[in-house]
Each structure stands twice: as C-alpha cells, then as structure tokens.
C-alpha cells in the first residue's frame, strides 16, 4: 500500500492563479480531509469528506473547493490564489468518520503564493 | 472559546530520561484525544488514542494519561532516545463534532 499520496510536493503560484492539489489513498478509507499548517498555528481543517459524493466545510474553507467523485481521490482546488494561502497542505484519511481513530497523513504540499 | 494548549517552548532532555509533554484544553468535552508525532518536512504520524473513559494507555515506551477533570493529557516517553526528537501534537475530537482539532505541538529534543 502506498498509503496517502500528495502531488505536487512543492508549488509556486502567482496571486490570482488557480491550481489543484492532488490527494489519493489506497486503503479504501471513507473519511478524507485537508488541513493547512502554518507556523505557530497548528493544523487547521479546510474541508473534509465522509464518502464519495459528500463533502463539508472545516474551520478555514474560504478560497478552497473540494470534490469527492471516487473513494480514492480528494483534490483541493485553490480558486484564485492569495499570499495568505502560502502554507503547507496535508491530506489525511481514516477508515470512517465514526471510527476516525487513526488518521493517516500524506507527506504534504508546500505552496508559496507570490 | 475552545482552546488546546501545548507548551510552545521546546523540551530539552538527556537521553535515557523520561520526557513528559502536556496538552491542556478548555471548553471541550472530547470523546477521545490523540497524540501524533511530526518530523520536519513530514506529515504527522499517529501514535496513541485515549478515550474519555480511560485514564491511561500504554504502547511500548509511550504512555498517555487523560484527566477529564483537570482537562489535561500527559504524554510520556520513557528511556528517551535522540531518535525521539520531533514535534508532538495532541488532537481532540468532541463527541458529535467529528472534526478533530489540533494543538500547535511541542518540540522535544533529546540530547545524547
């Protein structure tokens, strides 16, 4: 099993550009989520999904869109990048929402918005 | 407002000693609490989970306690090693919210 994979590892964007951060898991997990991690701020939940076709907002959803068309994939879209979105983004998955006892995190995507 | 507090100052200890990290919370009623390890440039790795009705959980050299009266969890690493140096995060999920909230983490540095 590859676990949770994220691409790209690094990305530089200009303000106003859009892009999609990819996340995939091969563990047949129902629950997937996106976090951002900023210095001194800890991990903050952006969006999450409890299964294919179902998504919901987390703590900091503004400026981001998600979709979940398959169990395996959960892409995060930046609609119009802003410098405030410079961060490290982590995707995570777990067996199910109700049994979210262990979250498996991906390696992260480091994003710089100029 | 809800808060999760972990010591922002790094904890420096000598190899072989027991490291103790603290996670305090306010205005939460967590169904369970998790501890993760994060190395620089990597994603968090799950270590232990303790439920609200459990007082202590152990896994090899790791021990977690959970005091819902004090609203505090302690994370212990016994016989610490330089390889234990990392940032340790606690996360809470209140019953029904299903959204885990993370503390900012505490850096542990184990000196040989």
Image (spheres, grey):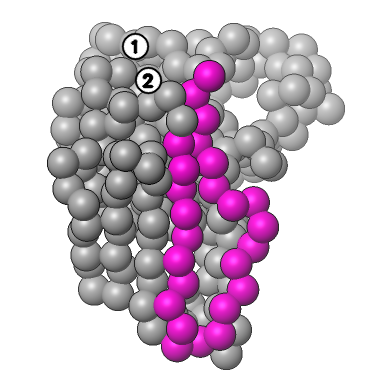
Q: Residue at horizontal 29%, vertical 55%?
A: B65
Q: Is residue A29 left or right of residue A93?
A: left
Mark on residue B55?
none
Q: Main secondary structure of the magenta part?
A: strand
Q: Which residues are magenta?
A: B1-25
Q: What residue is shown with label 2?
A: A48
Could you classify mark 1 by the number of other residues whose Cα lies within 10 Å: few (under 14), some (14-19), or many (20 or more)?
some
> Disc 1 on helix, strand or loop?
strand
Task: Please state which of residues B63 and B42 is positioned toward the viewer in this rendering.
Answer: B63
Task: Please state which of residues A105 and B92 is positioned toward the viewer in this rendering.
Answer: B92
**Quarter holding the C terminus of chain A?**
top right
Residue A39 in sight from this viewpoint:
yes
Residue A104 in sight from this viewpoint:
no
Relative to B87, is B30 above or below? above
Q: What residue is shown with label 1?
A: A55
Q: Residue at horizontal 60%, vertical 67%?
A: B11
Q: CA distance from mark 2 to mark 1?
A: 6 Å
**Residue A56 at what x, y percent from top left?**
37, 10
**Residue A53 at what x, y percent from top left?**
26, 9
Q: Is residue A65 left or right of residue A93?
A: right
Q: Are marks 2 and 1 in contact (CB under 8 Å)?
A: yes
Relative to A97, is B34 above or below? below
Using the rendered view, name the quadrant where residue B41 is placed: bottom right
């Amino acid at each position: 099993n590859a676990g949770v994979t994220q691409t790209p590892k690094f990305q530089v964007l200009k303000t106003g550009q859009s892009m999609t951060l990819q996340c995939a898991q091969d563990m047949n997990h129902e629950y997937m989520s996106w976090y951002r991690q900023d210095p001194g701020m800890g991990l903050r939940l952006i969006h999450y999904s409890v299964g294919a076709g179902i998504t919901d907002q987390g703590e900091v959803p503004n400026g981001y869109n998600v979709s979940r068309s398959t169990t395996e994939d959960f892409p995060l879209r930046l609609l119009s990048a802003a410098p405030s979105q410079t961060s490290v983004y982590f995707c995570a998955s777990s067996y199910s929402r109700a049994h979210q006892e262990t979250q498996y995190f991906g390696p992260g995507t480091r994003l710089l918005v100029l | 407002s809800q808060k999760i507090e972990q010591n922002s100052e790094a904890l420096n200890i000598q190899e072989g000693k027991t490291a103790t990290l603290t996670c305090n919370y306010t205005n939460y009623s967590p169904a369970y609490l998790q501890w993760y390890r994060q190395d620089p440039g990597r994603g968090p790795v799950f270590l232990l989970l303790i439920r609200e009705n459990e007082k202590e959980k152990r896994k090899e050299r790791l021990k977690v306690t959970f005091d819902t009266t004090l609203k505090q969890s302690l994370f212990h690493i016994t016989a610490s090693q330089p390889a234990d140096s990392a940032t340790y995060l606690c996360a809470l999920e209140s019953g029904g919210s299903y959204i885990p909230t993370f503390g900012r983490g505490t850096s542990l540095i184990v000196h040989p």
